[in-house]
Image (tube, rainbow, N blue to C red):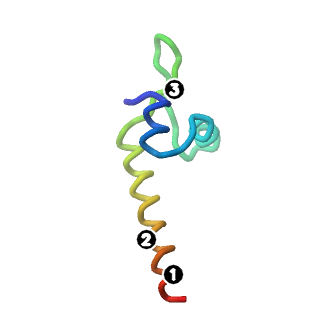
Amino acid sequence: MVTIKSAAEILGVSVETLRNWDKAGKLKSERDPQNRYRMYCITEIQKLLKDKVLKQKKEKRGKLID
């Protein structure tokens, strides 16, 4: 599990974006039971990164075809 700040840095987005994604269900957080801070599962972050890379590759391929 990583903090919201660390997750934002890994994904290259703002902390506020992560909060919005959490509300929208795109990347769910869990709450630390002691301080209630948002914590993110590294495997879920990796899945999101993989999807992001695949999407970028598809977009790049599409531009090459045009």
Name the foreground residue: 30 vs 6.
Answer: 6
Could you give the CA–CA distance between mark 2 and mark 1, rounded to whole angstroms?
9 Å
User: Which numbered disc covers residue 62?
Assistant: 1
**Residue at 46% over, 10% down:** 34
Sequence-wise, the earlier of marks 2 and 1 is 2
**Residue at 52% over, 38% down:** 28
User: Does residue 32 appear left or right of residue 66 in this picture?
Assistant: left
At label 1, the amino acid type is Gly
Question: Is 57 placed above or below 9 here?
Answer: below
x and y percent of residue 64 in the render? 48, 84
Name the foreground residue: 43 vs 6.
Answer: 6
x and y percent of residue 7 in the render? 45, 37
**Residue at 41% over, 44% down:** 44
Q: Between label 2 and label 3, give the one nearer the viewer.
A: 2
**Residue carrying label 3:** 38
**Residue carrying label 2:** 57
